[in-house]
Amino acid sequence: MNQKVCTDPVTFFQFNIKYTEEESELNELIEHLIAGQYHLITLQGVSQQSKQQIIEKLSPYFPYFIRGESDNQYVVSDQLLFSQYAFTRIKYHQRGGSSFLISSQWQLPFSVINLHTLHPPSPRNEQLWQTRNKTLYQLKHALKNSSLSDSLVKKSLVIGDLNLSKHSGRINILRDDMNTKFVNSWPNKGYVLPFMGFAIDHFWVSKPANICSRQRINKFSWSDHYAVKTEVDFNR
């Protein structure tokens, strides 16, 4: 766990739920999210079958959400986002009929954040390797374009399972000196000690915002990822 003192933090939950369909598993997750009172929830690995069930149960507590699919663009993704605050300018970055990267502006009471959430595929073969890398290039351009298109919105945030280790040289190039803290979030296996895992569930925030803490949540054994809770002080 990485932790510093944080006063009045903005709290985030991120989790690749690995396309789970068991109702008991989803209920465990939903109960945790309601009790946690997070400001922003980002889920990856959400099946189309599970999305509506999660939305119906969480939307009374988190009235703003991004469904991760667009009828207008004929595009789907495995992402699902919830917040206590509104999303505007939602954009799905397409690759065929899929979108591995979603950009939006997140309307916090004290600031607007350029938010980019993503889940490129695991590079298990040459085609998926290329798709992952092209998604990362989309992220690089999205970060650049978001800062140019609206000069009043200076803060940026990147959250997602990038299927890319912290040891990759691409990380430093992509995040362009944004603040981060790495947490070994994969695999969620009892026989794998924390220091032997991989930090592939990333969280980057533009300076001078400070990441006060990032910690694994040791629950949800039905996924091969750990969920991660992050606290940020945007007032620095």
Image (spheres, rainbow, N blue to C red):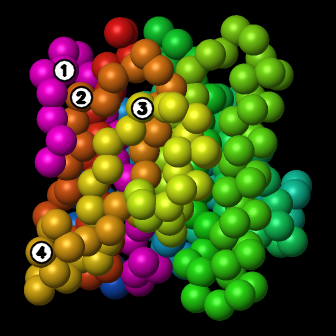
Q: Which numbered disc, 1 or 3, marks the residue that appears first in the sequence?
A: 1
> In terms of secondary structure, where does tag 3 sit?
strand
Q: Is residue 160 left or right of residue 130?
A: left
Q: Where is residue 54 drawn, in percent x and y?
A: 44, 62
Asked if disc 3 and disc 4 are in contact, CB closer than 8 Å, the reply is: no
Query: Dot 1: what SS?
Result: loop
Disc sitting over residue 6 in the figure: 1
| 7 in the magenta segment | yes
Which quarter of the figure has residue 65? top right
Where is 231 relative to 228, above or below? above
How far apart, in angstroms, are the residues tagged by discs 2 and 3? 11 Å
Q: CA distance from mark 1 to mark 3?
A: 15 Å
From the viewer's perspective, is the residue at label 2 or at label 3 nearer? 3
- The amino acid at mark 2 is Cys
> Which label is found at residue 193?
4
Q: Position of residue 23 (x, y in %)?
A: 32, 79
Report the number of discs.
4
